[in-house]
Amino acid sequence: MSIAENYRRVQGRVSEAALKAGRDPSDITIVAVTKTHPAATVEEALAAGVTDVGENRVQEFLSKARDVTSPCRWHLVGHLQTNKVNKVIGRFAMIHSIDSLDLAEKISAAGEREGVTTDILVEVNTSGEESKYGLEAEGALEVCAAIAGLPAISLRGLMTVGPWVDDAAVLSKAFASLRLLGEKIGEAGISGISMEHLSMGMTDDFEIAIAEGSTIVRLGRVIFGERRP
């Protein structure tokens, strides 16, 4: 199938999952993740109606974005190294993967120099897997409170990567834990914090994530097929 056909199908699945959960489908944003796919594929996706495009690696984004001429909102969904911060300021609509106060401080400092406020999500490791990035849930509120005080940061919510299992109950528990953490942080009433977004759910588990409150799903393979080598 073409990218346009895949995108229409996944829009239908997102809508169906939202309605089944008693939610408004328009509250859920699809970020089409184009890791390993060239600029021409991004352009094809944008022509098909995609508005938000996700990239995992800064260097790949920098080489690809210059060849994408159609308007879109870029999201950085992969791990960001502190030495790459200066390269991303002002380039992304949102950075999903803030996993430390130190990283947030560097983004804020760079943003102050450039006169740019960066929308971010704080990444939480809800599965406890050592291979995953992200804060532990315990202590996340305190880190979010510290980040909220930074001058060139807008904290918009949380992000997680579901556990690598084929078990709906385990996935639901991980996603529900992020939702509950977001509610806890939101109820703390800390100035400068908005918990409007939960970025969770990818190709194999996005419908479960939507049932648990996801507002942003990060979809690659279901739209573009297998990643290129």
Image (spheres, rainbow, N blue to C red):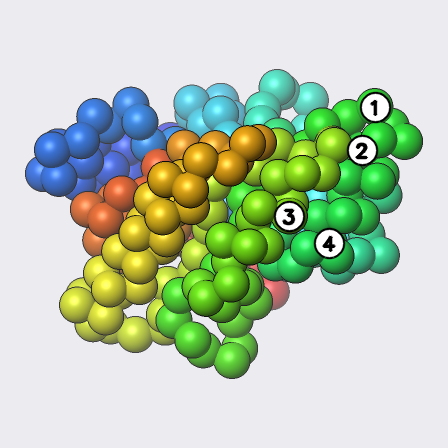
The residue beneath circle 4 is 103
On the rendered image, what quadrant is the N terminus found in? top left
* Quarter of image, res 92: top right
Q: Which type of secondary structure does the marked residue at label 1 adopt?
A: loop
The residue beneath circle 3 is 146
> Is residue 11 found left or right of 115 in the rendered image?
left
Residue furthest out toward the bottom: 130
The residue beneath circle 2 is 111
* Mark-to-mark CA distance, 3 and 4: 12 Å
Give the residue type that dot 2 points to. Gly
Circle count: 4
* Mark-to-mark CA distance, 4 and 2: 12 Å
Q: Position of residue 68 (x, y in %)?
A: 68, 29
Mark 4: few/some/many CA within 10 Å (<14, 14-19, 20+): some
* Mark-to-mark CA distance, 1 and 2: 6 Å
At 40% from the left edge and 65% from the top edge, which residue is drawn? Answer: 126
Tag 4–tag 1 contact (CB < 8 Å): no
* Mark-to-mark CA distance, 2 and 3: 17 Å
> Is residue 206 found left or right of 2 in the rendered image?
left
The residue beneath circle 1 is 115
Tag 2–tag 3 contact (CB < 8 Å): no
Q: Which type of secondary structure does the marked residue at label 4 adopt?
A: helix
Which of the pair 139/33 is nearer the observer? 139
Position of 129 relative to 70 (above/below): below
Tag 1–tag 2 contact (CB < 8 Å): yes
Give the residue type that dot 4 points to. Leu
* Mark-to-mark CA distance, 4 and 1: 18 Å
Position of 75 relative to 205 (above/below): above
